Structure formats: structure tokens, C-alpha cells
């Protein structure tokens, strides 16, 4: 029942708007940043990508899911007025009006202009060297990124302020109270500085002490042993569970990842050693011949009966296990360790057009100022990169990771000199139609060679067609 619900689960979300306002990081320049999403929908489909309902008769080794999203955008509005303090109904209407959907086109400084696309997911219950366990295909029409100088200024100020608050949080417990500051602020701040310095010195010296090193080694061995037991299928309880939770509470995220990597490496090594030892064991001798048959009949009848009973029990248990797997629609080949050549994950991204631009925001000109000495009053692209028909592929295997990127077109525009006759400073020369694309390797590396031309002249012709205009 749970498997059927998960297979037919559908999600539909509309009008999502997350907004962050800040008037502290950059005094005099309040800004607002946010993410907007018109709609997001996930549904179950069949192998022909048509919406369907999975039943017992339609269950197979593949599960298809289709996710569609519309008007996904990221904005960073500089010198923006705050919309806080509104009532609930006014806030709902205001937030909805700032979403680029249903014919609305709000005025934003977009970092990512509203984009629509879809994602197709295939979940396979078994993995081979040609069929991945999880297969995802992402398709976008246009991805346009941009960043102007005002957005960069406010973003850097926000990061500096975040770093300042993070640094303050380390010594916040030593800060003097308001009463101490009113009585003698200078003495209170001096005590605060002394406590902060003593805390740093004490922490540094403690990490160098022999007792700390011994305690950390014991803690590491204890955590590695408990994590190995948990990974092996054992259920931690009692003191083991308390120790495991207490150690994870004390450790940092980096230490937990480091200790777990040690435990996984040891488990892998122990498993390989066990497999090698099992393969090296000699086969059991079989009693043959006259005397062997007589000896087996006299002394080995009991062991033979025991072995036959064990085989019957094993067959019954295996049959019962297969029936249980059939009830929950589980594939035995999907569990355990995968072969080194099997694909665990494959992600494909197809983009029709993409761009990235660095812009200069227009300078506000006072009404009575001399316009001849002011900067430009129009937003302009200092430099922009445009690429089209792009494809990317990522394949993850148990022991390696492969990635490939193909660009159908690539152009760099220079906007620092208005009115120039040569705005394209870098571009790839387009083909004339006499060339065919050939896939040279499994990594997706593509070369262009004339149809029917011998490979010796391929390098010369490829050099002539791969020109950079500077």
C-alpha cells in the first residue's frame, strides 16, 4: 500500500514567493532579494510520458515521474522600499503581485530571469552498465543570468555583515549586561576583552594537551565502532545509543564526516578480506569408491541427513523471502553493492539558449546637476556571454564520476565602448553545413570533420574552422 501511494504521489504548488529585506548591511542602500515561482507540479506518467495511475498490473521495473515548473526567477532589487508592516491580506496581495506569472510582469532586477522547464525522472529497480538506478533529464528554454555593480556592492556588504555577526556569536556569552555598561562602560568592555582572549588561549592550549588527544582518540574509536555496527544492520540500544548520540552532539559536521569515512573504509576492507578468505577455503572432500561408500554409510549417515535438512530449510526460507519481495514489489538485484561499471545516477541537461552578463546600473542624476559630467543614464552590459544548444551529462558509478559538456555556440560581447563596430570579441565560427558531428568517445567529446575527408587533414580543417576573433 505504501509503495502504491509513493508511486502515484502528485504534488502541485502555485505562487511561491520568498523575500529577504535588509537595511542594515549597506546603510543608505536598502535592498530586497527573493525567489519567485509561478507553479510547480509533479505527476506520475507512463513510458510514453502520458499521465497515468500505477496499479498492480502496470507495475514494472521502471517508475516515471514528470516535474514541470513555470516562471522560476531570482531577483536582487537595490535601493528598494520595504513592504513590511502590511496586514495579512495586503501582504498576500503584494507578494502575489511581485510574482512573474499569469500575465504579471513586475519590475525586478533579476539575477535569474523567469525561466520555465521540465524534468523527467526514471527510477529503475535495478542498475546495469547501460541502465542507471536514477535517470534525470532537465530541459530549459532560456537561462539568463545577470549581475550589476549595485547588486555586487550590496551582496558584499551582506556577506561582511554576516561574517561580523558570526564572529560576535563566538563571544556573545562574555558580553557585559546593560547594568554593567551603565555603571562603568570602560571597565565592562575591558573585562569583556580579557574574557574573550582568555577563552581563545584556553581553547588553543586544551587542544594541545595530552589528555585532549587521548580523549579524542578514544572518542574516535568508539564512534567508528558504533557506526560500523549501525551500518552492518545492528540496532543500537541502551548505552550504545546514548554514547552514539552524545558523541554526534559534541562533534562538528566536519569531524562526523571524517569519522564516518574511516568507518566505511574499514567496512569495505573487512568485506574484501572476508570474500578473499572464503574463496581461499578448500572444497569439502566427497567420499567415493568402495571404502568411501562403506565409511560414509556407517559414519556419515547422520551428517548427510543433517545437511539435507539444512538444504530443505534454506530452500523454504528463500522461497518465503521471494514471496515477500513479490508482495512489496522489491527487486533483489536492486540491493547490495553494485558492480563497478553499473550506473547509479545519470543527469542530462539540455539548454536551448543561455547567457550571463555583467551590467552597470544607471547613475541617478540630480535635477540641477550638469549632465555633461554625469555617468550614463541607461543600464548597459559591460560584458556578456551567450551560448546556445548546450548539453551537459553527469554519470555517477560506484567508483568514479564522469561529466561531459557540449556547447553549440559561444559568443562574448564587449560593451565597455559604446558604438564600437566590433562588439563580438570572441565567437565560434558557425559551420557551413558541409560538416558532420561525430561522437569520438563515451565522454561526449565531439569534433567536426568534413564528410568524406580523410583523418589526416581533419586537424588542419578543424583549425581553420575554430577561429577566435579578438
Image (cartoon, rainbow, N blue to C red):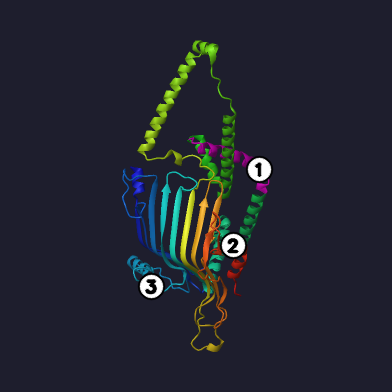
Residue 192 rendering spot, x and y as whole percentages: 61, 58
In the image, is 140 to the left or to the right of 444? left
Distance, label 3 to label 1, CA atoms, is 61 Å
Q: Quadrant of residue 90?
A: bottom left
Instruction: Residue under label 2, please give it.
Output: 454
Name the residue nearer the viewer: 5 or 363: 5
Q: Residue at x 56, y 33 (%)?
A: 275
Q: Could you say which is closer to the camera, residue 217 or residue 140? A: 140
| Crowd around label 1: few <14 · some 14–19 · many ≥20 (10 Å) | few
Measuring from the top left, give residue 141's x and y in whole percent: 43, 66
Q: Residue at x 40, y 40 (%)?
A: 330
Q: Are marks 2 and 3 in contact (CB under 8 Å)?
A: no
Look at the numbered discs 3 and 1 and tell me whether their residues touch, using CB distance below 8 Å: no
Q: Earlier in the sequence, mark 3 or mark 1?
A: 3
Look at mark 3 in the image and give the residue it sits on. 105
Find the distance from the CA under tag 2 to the CA under tag 3.
55 Å
Which residues fall within the magenta stretch? 205-234
**Label 2 SS:** loop
Q: Upstream in the sequence, badge 2 or badge 3?
A: 3
Q: Residue at x 47, y 59 (%)?
A: 349
Q: Is residue 451 magenta?
A: no
Amino acid at each position: 500500500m505504501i509503495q502504491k501511494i509513493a508511486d502515484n504521489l502528485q504534488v502541485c504548488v502555485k505562487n511561491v514567493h520568498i523575500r529577504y529585506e535588509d537595511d542594515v548591511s549597506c546603510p543608505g542602500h536598502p535592498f530586497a532579494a527573493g525567489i519567485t515561482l509561478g507553479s510547480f507540479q509533479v505527476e506520475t506518467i507512463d513510458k510514453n510520458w502520458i499521465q497515468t495511475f500505477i496499479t498492480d498490473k502496470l507495475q514494472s521495473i521502471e517508475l516515471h515521474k514528470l516535474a514541470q515548473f513555470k516562471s522560476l526567477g531570482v531577483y536582487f532589487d537595490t535601493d528598494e522600499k520595504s513592504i513590511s508592516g502590511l496586514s495579512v491580506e495586503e501582504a498576500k496581495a503584494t507578494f502575489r503581485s511581485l510574482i512573474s506569472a499569469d500575465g504579471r510582469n513586475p519590475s525586478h532586477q533579476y539575477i535569474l530571469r523567469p525561466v520555465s522547464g521540465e524534468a523527467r525522472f526514471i527510477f529503475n529497480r535495478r542498475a546495469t552498465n547501460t541502465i542507471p538506478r536514477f535517470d534525470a533529464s532537465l530541459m530549459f528554454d532560456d537561462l539568463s543570468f545577470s549581475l550589476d555593480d549595485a547588486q555586487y556592492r550590496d551582496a558584499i556588504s551582506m556577506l561582511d555583515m554576516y561574517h561580523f555577526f558570526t564572529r560576535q556569536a563566538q563571544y556573545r556569552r562574555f558580553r557585559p549586561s546593560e547594568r554593567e555598561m551603565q555603571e562603568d562602560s570602560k571597565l565592562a568592555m575591558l573585562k569583556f576583552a580579557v574574557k574573550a582572549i582568555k577563552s581563545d588561549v584556553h581553547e588553543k592550549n586544551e587542544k594541545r594537551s595530552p589528555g585532549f588527544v587521548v580523549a579524542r582518540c578514544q572518542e574516535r574509536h568508539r564512534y567508528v565502532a558504533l557506526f560500523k555496527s549501525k551500518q552492518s544492520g545492528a540496532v543500537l540500544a541502551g548505552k550504545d545509543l546514548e554514547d552514539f548520540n552524545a558523541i554526534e552532539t559534541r562533534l562538528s559536521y566536519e569531524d562526523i564526516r571524517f569519522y564516518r569515512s574511516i568507518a566505511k573504509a574499514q567496512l569495505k576492507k573487512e568485506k574484501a578480506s572476508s570474500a578473499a578468505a572464503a574463496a581461499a577455503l578448500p572444497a569439502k572432500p566427497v567420499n567415493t569408491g568402495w571404502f568411501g561408500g562403506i565409511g560414509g554409510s556407517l559414519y556419515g549417515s547422520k551428517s548427510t541427513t543433517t545437511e539435507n535438512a539444512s538444504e530443505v530449510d534454506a530452500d523454504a526460507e528463500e522461497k518465503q523471502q521471494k514471496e515477500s519481495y513479490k508482495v512489496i514489489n522489491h527487486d533483489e538485484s536492486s540491493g547490495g553493492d553494485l558492480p563497478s561499471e553499473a550506473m547509479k545516477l545519470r543527469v542530462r541537461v539540455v539548454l536551448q539558449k543561455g547567457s550571463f552578463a555583467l551590467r552597470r546600473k544607471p547613475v541617478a542624476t540630480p535635477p540641477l546637476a550638469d549632465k555633461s559630467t554625469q555617468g550614463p543614464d541607461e543600464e548597459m552590459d559591460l560584458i556578456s556571454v551567450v551560448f546556445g544548444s548546450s548539453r551537459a551529462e553527469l554519470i555517477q558509478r560506484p567508483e568514479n564520476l564522469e561529466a561531459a559538456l557540449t556547447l553549440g555556440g559561444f559568443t562574448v560581447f564587449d560593451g565597455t565602448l559604446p558604438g564600437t563596430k566590433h562588439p563580438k570579441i570572441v565567437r565560434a565560427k558557425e559551420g557551413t553545413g558541409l560538416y558532420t558531428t561525430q561522437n569520438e568517445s563515451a565522454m561526449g567529446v565531439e569534433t567536426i570533420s568534413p564528410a568524406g575527408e580523410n583523418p589526416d587533414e581533419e586537424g588542419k580543417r578543424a583549425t581553420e574552422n575554430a577561429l577566435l576573433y579578438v
